[in-house]
Structure formats: C-alpha cells, structure tokens
Amino acid sequence: MQIPQPGNTPHTAEEKSRGLEKSAMGIVGLETAFPIVYTYLVKAGLISLVRMIELLCDNPRKLFRLGGRLAEGEDANLAVFDIRTPYKIESSKFFSMGRSTPFEGWEVLGRPLLTLYKGQAVWQDEQYK
C-alpha cells in the first residue's frame, strides 16, 4: 500500500468514483467528527458528552503527548461548536481541500463556530463574526 504524499491528495471526484476497489483511498473525517459523534452517539444517549470529549480530545492529546490542557494562565487551544442548531453537512463548504465524505447532506448538530490556537482565533465561521 502506498501512503499518499502531500500533493497527491485530495483526490479528484473522478478518482473517488471508481467503485470500492478501484477508487482512491481516504475521506474527510476531521471536519465531520464532532457533529457526527455528537449527533449520533451523544444525542442518541449511547455515550455522554464527557466521554466524547475524552475520546476526541483528551485521549489523542495524551497518546501523542501533545500537551495543551485547558487551564488558567495557559494559552487556549479549543474549538467552539453550536450544539443547538441543526445544519446539513456540505462538503463544498469544508475548510480542507478534500471533499469526499459519506456524510454529505446529513443533518447534524455541532456546527463549528471558532477555533483558538495559543489563545488566538485562527478560524471563525463567517456567519458568526
């Protein structure tokens, strides 16, 4: 298996439409992870919000030794989500260049509004500025 290198991805729609065995590998997951897990696991009562945060935030931070705990006096690294207003996943609006997602058109909760890195806003939804 060849690991995709920068410049080889994202794949074109044609490269992704060749069927399961012949299509280029990979889907966009980061931009849909929070809303999919929140909507279909937390809201469905399968896991708690605390458990979701452990799985998506705390555990990767510990596993990869990233540091960055949210604490008084520390620069904030965090994302803010709207968990009350439903919206549809539209890959054409993704920040990343990848557009391949099995969740296109799904109605979810958890629209990203703001990302802070080292206490500075590095991304903000245009609608909420």
Image: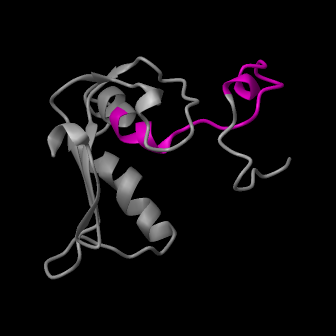
Q: In the rendered image of this protein, does residue 73 appear above or below residue 16?
A: below
Instruction: Give the residue at x 54% y 41%.
Output: 97
Q: Position of residue 123 (x, y in %)?
A: 31, 54
Q: Number of callouts in the render?
A: 0
Q: Quadrant of residue 23?
A: top right
Q: Position of residue 118 (x, y in %)?
A: 29, 73
Q: Position of residue 122 (x, y in %)?
A: 31, 60
Q: Quadrant of residue 69?
A: bottom left
Instruction: Give the residue at x 39% y 19%.
Output: 106
Region rendered in magenta:
13-35
Q: In the rendered image of this protein, does residue 62 appear above or below residue 95?
A: below
Left or right, residue 19 beside residue 103: right
Q: Nearer the viewer, residue 48 or 16?
A: 16
Furthest-bottom residue in view?
A: 73
Q: In the rendered image of this protein, does residue 112 appear above or below residue 22?
A: below
Q: Nearer the viewer, residue 80 or 41?
A: 80
Magenta run includes residue 16: yes
